[in-house]
Image: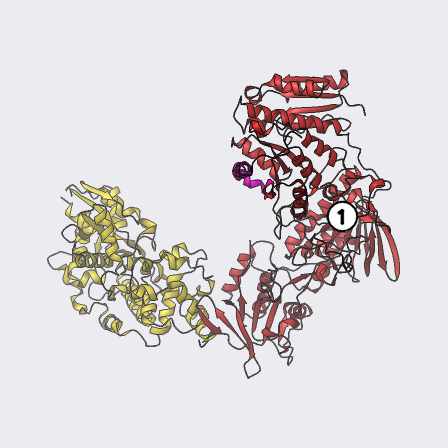
Amino acid sequence: MEKKIGVYICTGCGIGDALEIDALAGVATDEYEAAVCRQNAFLCSREGVAEIKHDLENEGINTIVIAACSPRVMTDVFDFGVDKVCERVNLREQVVWSHPPNDEDTQMMAQDQLRMGITKAKEMQPAEPFMAEDLSRKILVVGGGLAGITAASEANKAGYEVVLVEKSDQLGGYLKEVHKLPPSRPPYEELQDFDLGAVTGQVTDQPAVKVYTNAQIAKISGAPCMFDVQIQQNGGVADERVGAIVLATGAIPYDAAKLEHLGFGKSADVITAAQLESMFKSGDVKRPSNGQPITGAAFILCAGSRDPKHLPYCSAACCVESLKQAKYFKQANPETPVYIFYKDLRAHGTYELLYKQLQKDGVIFVRGDVTGVEEDGSGGLVVSADDVLTGSPVMSESVDVVVLATGMVPTTALGKKFKVQEPKEGEEELAVPEDTIVVSNNLNLDYRQGPELPALKYGFPDSHFICFPYESRRTGIYPAGSVRAPMDYWRAVDDATGAALKAIQCVQMVSEGKAVHPRAGDLTYPEFFMQRCTQCKRCTEECPFGAINEDEKANPLPNPTRCRRCGVCMGACPERIISFKNYSVGMIGNAIKSIDVPDEYEEKPRILVLACENDAYPALDMSGIRRMSYNPWVRIVPVRCLGSMNLVWIADALSKGIDGILLLGCKHGDDYQCHFIKGSELANIRMSKIQETLNRLVLESERVRLEQISIADYSKLPEILDSFAAKLDEVGPNPYKGY
Amino acid sequence: MEPKYVSLEMRDYITGMGAETLNWCMQCGLCTNLCPWRLVPGEISEKFNIRHMQRLGQMGMEGFEDEQVLFACSTCSMCQTNCPRGVKIVDNVRGMRSSIVGAGMAPANLRPILGSAHAQGNPWSGPREKRTDWQQGLDVPQFDGDKEYFLFVCCHSCYDQRSTKVAKSITRLLQRAGVSFGVIGAEESCCGESMRKLGDEELFQKLAQSNIKLFNDKGVKKIITTSPHCLWTFQNEYPELGGEWEVIHYTQLLEQLLEDGKLSFPESLGKRVAFHDPCYLGRHSGIYEAPRKLLAAVPGAETLELTRCREMSLCCAGGGGRIWAEVPMGERFGELRISDAVGKGAEILTTSCPYCLNMLTDACNSMDKQEVLEINELSEILAASLA
C-alpha cells in the first residue's frame, strides 16, 4: 500500500496553550513530509472528524496520525475503518497535563512523541483479519453435572448448538448422590427438595443439544471455531467440530484415607459427608459398625482442608453442606445431639439464616481445632478440640458417628504431571517456569504444550483469579463449576452461565476474525516469516496460551484463533521473524530510533519507557488526568505486554545514546496481575540477559530497570520515573550519544 | 490442661430454666464490648465476660457458677438491645442463675434478702405491717373498687428512709392533679422482679401469685407504679401468670395530666438538671420522652443531657439484684455517671427509679461530690415546683 500520511494535531484540552503547535507541525511536514498536516481546536467534534474524512476521500490519505488525547479515549470517534491505518499520539495526558506549559523540554517531548507516532504509522499496515474455512459455532460442554447441564442449557437458550459429553451413564453428576439441597428461597431455614429429572430435562429434551453419555473425550485438536473432537462412546468414536469448550468436570472429595488423625479407617463409624449423604438418599441411615440407628453425630468441618498437610484451601461449600446434613438429623429427631466442630463457619449470604436455625435447633457449635477422635470404651466416639471460645480444651459427649466434611479436589488435578520434554544431558534447564499440566484425561488436547488446561497452584485450571475468573490459559476453553474453584450449587449455576457466555463470545469473535479477551476485537495476529526461522522453539515454549504447535522439524505451527495477540512470541524470537500488521520489532525499534537525543553537553537526558498497555499505560494517563508531574526526559512507548519486548530494542536505545530504559509491567509471581499470565515474568527473565548487551557496550547495569505497576499505582509513578532519572544523573550520560 | 466436658443435659437444663435463646448466640462478642463492666477496672470486670459466660452455658460446661461471674450482670440490656442475633441475654443470665439458685445454692450474701422477701414480702427486712409507714402525715386514700388507679409503691420507697420521699412526692402530685387512686397497703408484696433476676424462680412465683390474687380480689384494673422495675414485671411477666391490668409508670401518667392541663408547675427551680435514664424505664420499656417533657415543664430547670443517654444510657448498676452487691469504690458504674454530670456542669442529677436514686446517691457520697451535685428523683423536683 502506498502510504499517504495525514497528521492531525488537536489544540483543544490545553494542548494549544501549552505547546508551540507550528513547531510541532513542522516535525510532520518538514521531517516526515506528511501529505497533510492540520490543526483543529476540537478534533473530536463532528467538524474535526469530518475534516479528516474529507482528506481521506479527497486527498487520498490512508494513514492517519492523531496527535491529541490518549489512545484509550475517543476510540469510537477516531475510527476510520479497517482499511485505514490510524495511530494515536498522546499529547494530552502524557505531555501537557503532566508537564509545565510553554517549556522547551515539554515541547521536545511532544515532538519526540509525534516522531515516534509517525514512524510507527509509516510502517503499519491495515489489519487483514484471520479467516479460516469451515468455522463451527457449536459449543462443547465436557461434564454433565449441574454446571455442565446449566452451561449447555444456557448456550442452547441463546441459540447455539451444544454437544454435551458425560462420562457416566446418567446426567446429574454429584446431584445424583444428593438427598436435599440447602435453602435457596425464603425463609432460607428449611432444606429444599429437588427434581433431578427437571434439571437434566433442560438438556435432554432439546433438539439442538446432543448428549453423549458413557462417553469421554478421546482427543481434541485444532483451535477455537476449529476444534475437532473425538468422542469415545460404547467402543466407537464420534467426531464433532466445535467452536468453544466449557470444561465442567467438577471435583471429587478429598481422600479420607489420609485423615487417620481424625479417626478415619480406625473406626467404621467415622465416615465422610458423601457417605452420610448416600445414607440419607437411600433412607438407610445406620451406624456402619453395628447397623443400629444413629442417636448422636459430630461433624468435623475442614477435615483435611485449610491444612498445609492436606488441602491448603477452603472448599467453600462444606460448611453449608454440613449444616444441611445436621438438619437431616434434627428433622428426623429434634432430640438427636449434633455437634459441629469448625474453624470458621462460612455460611455466607442467606445461608446465615440456616446456620441460625440450626443454632436454634440446639446444634452445638465448637470453634477450634479437633485434637482427637477416640472410642469412648462403650462403643461410641468422643471428639476433643481446643475450643477457642472458652479458651480451653473440650470433649464432646459420646456420639454414634463422626462425619468428616472433606474438601474438593478438582478433576483436573487427578493424574500425573505432564512434562513437555526432559532436558537432555548438558542442556541447560529452561529458564521459563513451566505450566502445571496434569494428565487428567478430561480434554486430551492435541497441543504441544500438554493435553489439559494449565493450573494454578492448587490444581484448579484458573487463569486469573482476580480480574477474569472465567478465563483459562487455553483460548476458547472455559472452566466452570467446581473444577474451576470450590463452590456450592447455586454459585456453580451462575458460574456455568458465565462460562456459556464466554464460549458464545469466543465463537462470535473468532468467526469474525477478532481476538478474544483481553484484546477483544483486535483484528491483527502474529505472522511468521518462516524462511528465517531457526527452529529454536522459544515461541512455542513461551506462548502463555499454547497457541503454537510444531511440526516434526520443530517449525512453529501457529494457530491464530488460539492466539490472544499479546506478542510474547514476538518478544521471544531471536530472529525477529514474528510481527503484527501494526506492531513489530522493527516498527517499535525504528520509533525508538526516531527519538531526538541531544548531545551530553545539553544536559537533557533521555529515558525510554516501555509501558504495558494494560496497567502501566493507563496508570500514566491517570497520573496526567490528576495533573501529577514528572520529569520531561521520559519517552513513553506503549507495548501490548511487557512480554512482547524484544531485547534488540534495548540495544537500539542504548546505542543511540538514550541514557536509561524503564520497563513498566504488571505484577508477576504467584498472585500475578499480568493479563497474559506470564508476560511480565518473561520480561523479568529476559532482563537477566540484558546484562550481556550492557557488558558488550560497556554500560552500567543501572541503566535498565523493571518496575511492577498495577493500575491503581498511578500516584506512585512520578516518584518511580523521577527516582530513575535521579539514578541516571548519578550514573552520568550515556557515552554513545552522537554516534 | 484437662479437657472440660460438654454436657447437653446441663445445657438443656439451663435453657429449660429460661435461657431459651442461649443457643442462638454466635459468639460475636458484641455483648461483651457493650457491657458497662468494660468501663470500670477491678476483679469482677476482669472475670466477668457475658459472651464467655453464655458460651459455657451453651456447652453445659462448668465455670459459669462462680458467684462473681454469675451474679455480675446488672441486666441493663445494653447488650440485648444491640444483639445482632436477637438473643435474649437477660433471660439467659436469669436462666443460668436459676439453674444454681433453684438448686438451693444462692450466694450467702443474697440469702437474707431472699429470706426477707419470702417471709415478709419485701427484700429490705422490713416488717410487713410497716409497709405503710411512709404514709404517716399524709392522707393517702385506700384503694377500693371505685378508685380508677391502684398506686403500687415499690418496697424500696416503703422502707428506705430516703426513698420514702419518692412515694410521698408522687402521692402529692397525683392528689394535686385530682387522680382517683388508692393504695392497698400491708398485704402488698414485692413485685419480685429482682428476685426472679437473681434466679429465685420459686420465690418470684410465690410473690407474683400472692399479688395477683390480692389485686384481682380488690378489683384492680389500672396500676400506677413508682418504680420502672415493678412496671416491667407487671407488664411483661405477670400476664402469663394471670395478672392482666393496664400498668403505667407514674411519669407516663403525669405527662398525660400535664398535657391535659390538670397539672402545672409554677415554682421556678433555677438549676441545671441532667436526667439519668433508668434501664428498666428506657431500654427495657422504651420510655424516654415522658420524664423529659415533665422536666421541661418546670420553670427555671435548665436541662442538659449526659454523654450517654436514652438508648445508650449507662446503667447505675442496681438492676439484676446488684443493688445488694458490695462493689469496691472505683469500680462502681454510678461513679461514671456522677463524673459525667459534674463534668457537664449539672447541679442536679435526677432520675425516675428508686434503685437508680439509691445507687447514684451512694456513688455521689463516696466521691464526696454531694456539695456540687444533688441526686434526687424526678417526682421530688415536680412536687417542689407545685404552687
Q: Mark 1 belongs to which amino acid?
A: Arg
Task: Check the picture and name the quadrant holding the C terminus of chain A.
Answer: top right
- Write down the residue under mark 1: A538
Q: In this rendering, does residue B174 appear at all?
A: no
Q: Residue at x 27, y 64 (%)?
A: B322
Chain ID, mark 1:
A
Rendered position, A449 above or below A160: below
Specify the quadrant of the image occupied by residue A187.
bottom right
Q: Who's red, chain-wise?
A: A
Q: Residue furthest left?
A: B137
Q: Main secondary structure of the magenta part?
A: helix
Task: Check the picture and name the quadrant holding the N terminus of chain A.
Answer: top right
Does residue A695 belong to the magenta stretch? Answer: no
Locate residue A656, reporting x and y percent: 66, 32
In the rendered structure, the answer to whether residue A195 lies left or right of residue A635 reads: right
Specify the quadrant of the image occupied by residue A142.
bottom right
Specify the quadrant of the image occupied by residue A434.
bottom right
The answer to which of A255 and B182 lies nearer the viewer is A255
Locate residue A450, reporting x and y percent: 77, 55
Locate residue B229, reporting x and y percent: 29, 59
Locate residue A712, reporting x and y percent: 55, 41
In the rendered structure, the answer to whether residue A576 lies left or right of residue A192 reads: right
Q: In this rendering, does residue A185 appear at all?
A: yes
The answer to which of B292 and A23 lies nearer the viewer is A23
Range of residues picked out in magenta? A703-732
Describe the colour scheme in one phrase.
by chain
Task: Check disc 1: other Cα within 10 Å, few if <14, some if 14-19, many if 20+.
Answer: some
Find chain B in the image and tell me its colour. yellow
Look at the numbered disc 1 and give the secondary structure of its residue: helix
In the rendered structure, the answer to whether residue A725 lies left or right of residue A127 reads: left
